[in-house]
Every structure is written in C-alpha cells, then in structure tokens.
Amino acid sequence: MPKDKGPRDNKKARIAVVNRKTKETDISVSINIDGTGTYDIATGVGFFDHMLEQLCKHSLIDMTIKADGDLHIDAHHTVEDCGWALGAALKEAIGDKKGIRRYGHFDLVMDEVKSSAALDFSGRPYLIWKVALSKPKLGDLDTEVFQEFFQALSQGAGLTLHLENLYGENNHHIIESVFKGCAKALRMAVETDPRAPDQLPSTKGTL
C-alpha cells in the first residue's frame, strides 16, 4: 500500500539561489527551506559567519552563503548585502505563500540575556530594532552592522520584523540571542499549516 503523502509532498521544493554582484561585494546564496539546518558559510567575517550558522541551525533552513567583499574598508557592505541576498532567497523560495503559517514569534533566553523576535511575511518590509549594545565593536566588527543586516533581510524578503533585547549585559550574548530568536520565529512562519496547507493566510487574496 502506498504511503500517505504529507502536506508538502505534492508541492515543489522550496529552494532558491540568489547571486548579487556589485563593485563592493560578490554574494551567492542558496537555501532549502525544508532542510535540516545544514550550512556552508564563508563571508570573510568570522563572528558574522557564526551568527549566520545560528540562523541556519535554529531555523532548519539549509544555507550556503559565500561572500567576497571589500573588507579592506570594513564589513558593512558585506554584512548588508548578505542580508539582502538571503532575504531575496527567502522570498523566492516561499513563492506564493500558500500554506505557510506566515507569522512567527519567539522569546529566547541565553544565560543572562532575553530577546524577542516577531515577524510577518506580509510583503511589507519593516524593521523595528530595539537592541541596545554597550560597545561599538565586537572584536574588529562594528556592532551597528547587525541592524543593517536585519534591515536588508527585511527589505529583500518583504518581511515585517520586530527584534528586541529585553535585558542582558554581554554584547556577544545579546546579538546571538537575537539571531537565534529570529531563526526560531522564521522556522515557525515558513512551516506549512496542516489545517490550511493550500490556503493563502490573508483575506486580501495576495501577500
């Protein structure tokens, strides 16, 4: 007897490949939304690679991200363009958004830190960033680039994204908790809703 098919068995694979090349950066991103959290990431920015690995692992979205940027200037262009390319890949892979839960939210604790992530694949890019950091740098990396990453991710994906650090002291922990919380919220939002696997989660008829 044939095995019963799950809600995604009759749908095309949710994968995407995005390349972005400018005078400042050369970025390639490939993702599989229905993955297991495997990753192959090399941007030339060590701490940023670590954060992207967390985003991948905790969202269960397979990601390959390669970047060649103007790091002799600083990491700003590389981090920002990776955000845009990853967002564009998410938008392409999700497709018409039929069957997705659309919304995701997660409160994440990490040692002394608690951060909140909430998002909506609304088609309307908007970032609320309430993450105060006490130091301008983590190692050689300007901490302000993380807001630019999530702003670009929001723009590329058409994503309403609210990120907030509720409390905490260690800047490494704060940033990592934001990435992990966002990952968990992403996982929730892109999952197929078993009660509405073929429905668009909107009364408008489009997202």
Image: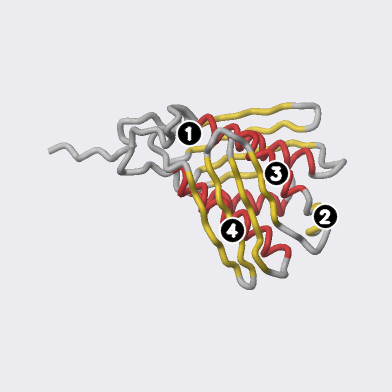
Nearer the observer, disc 3 or disc 2?
A: 3
Q: CA distance from mark 3 to mark 1?
A: 20 Å
Graded by Cα atoms within 10 Å as few (under 14), some (14 to 19) or many (20 or more), the crowding at tag 1 reads: many
Residue 41 relative to residue 194: left or right = right
Q: Secondary structure at mark 3?
A: helix
Tell me the kind of residue under disc 3: Phe
Q: CA distance from mark 1 to mark 4?
A: 23 Å
Q: Is residue 22 above or below residue 166?
A: above
Label annotation for residue 149: 3
Nearer the observer, disc 4 or disc 3?
A: 4
Q: Earlier in the sequence, mark 4 or mark 2?
A: 4
Nearer the observer, disc 4 or disc 2?
A: 4
Nearer the observer, disc 1 or disc 4?
A: 4
Q: CA distance from mark 4 to mark 3?
A: 17 Å
Q: Is residue 187 above or below residue 27?
A: below
| Residue drawn at x 48%, y 48% as measured from the top left | 187
Residue 35 relative to residue 69: left or right = left
**Label 1 sits on residue:** 94
Q: Secondary structure at mark 1?
A: helix
Which image quadrant is residue 22 in? top right
**Label 4 sits on residue:** 116
Residue 30 relative to residue 204: left or right = right
Tell me the kind of residue under disc 4: Ser
Q: Earlier in the sequence, mark 1 or mark 2?
A: 1
